[in-house]
Image (tube, grey):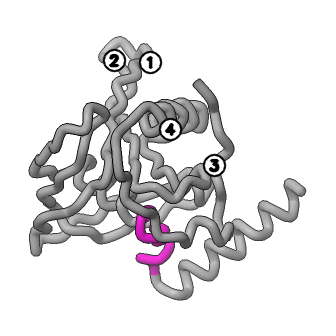
Amino acid sequence: MAIRPILTAPDPRLKAVSVAVEKVDGEIRKLAQDMADSMYAADGIGLAAIQIGVAKRVIVMDLDQKTEEGRAKKDWKVFINPKILWASPEMATYEEGCLSVPDIWDDVDRPARVRAEWLDLDGKRVEVEADGMLATCLQHEMDHLEGILFLDHLSRLKRNMAIKKLEKAKKLSA
């Protein structure tokens, strides 16, 4: 399909709130494939549609991209109109990064477990209870759908330092 450019902070389009997908059709399936291609090209594990400039509630993820032999394996999942139905009171801390916030990593606290639902590429409803990396990545990518970056979970000082670093990197590459 197509590899699309990934928006990087502080691009204001990343702050847009995404709209629900009305119908899972060929257009949405093509968008999901383009998102997966873009995610793999950038060596990521998750991508929300807004990160390629499309304000629709679509996420792709592949948390297990290597076989035991170390060969690349592409087994991505799509999450259309995802919703968190329940979040545990227990928190978990993971070091997060983001394709839209290149070269910046920091610890983020999120609920350790969530129950979520979404539509798959066939328009069928899926519901799972997730923990670990799946729970963290799902929450991270769903934040994008609300115009929230992982930087928004950091202290003001850490966030400002990260934004200055991103702006400096953009100036150097321009």
Tag 3 and tag 4, C-beta contact below 8 Å: no
From the viewer's perspective, tell me whether residue 22 is left or right of residue 72: left
Residue that mark 2 sits on:
67
- Residue at disc 3, secondary structure: loop
| Sequence-first disc among 3 and 2 | 3
| Sequence-first disc among 2 and 1 | 2
Using the numbered discs, state the Cα–Cα distance from disc 2 to disc 1 in whole angstroms.
Answer: 7 Å
Give the residues drawn in magenta, as a range.
144-154
* Residue visible at 30% across and 16% down in the picture: 68
- Residue at disc 1, secondary structure: loop
- What crowding class fits label 4: few (fewer than 14 Cα within 10 Å), some (14-19), or many (20 or more)? many
- Front in this rendered view, residue 72 or 39: 39
Residue that mark 3 sits on:
6
| Sequence-first disc among 3 and 1 | 3
- Looking at the picture, does residue 11 appear above or below residue 42? below
- What crowding class fits label 3: few (fewer than 14 Cα within 10 Å), some (14-19), or many (20 or more)? some
Using the numbered discs, state the Cα–Cα distance from disc 3 to disc 4 in whole angstroms.
Answer: 14 Å
Tag 2 and tag 1, C-beta contact below 8 Å: yes
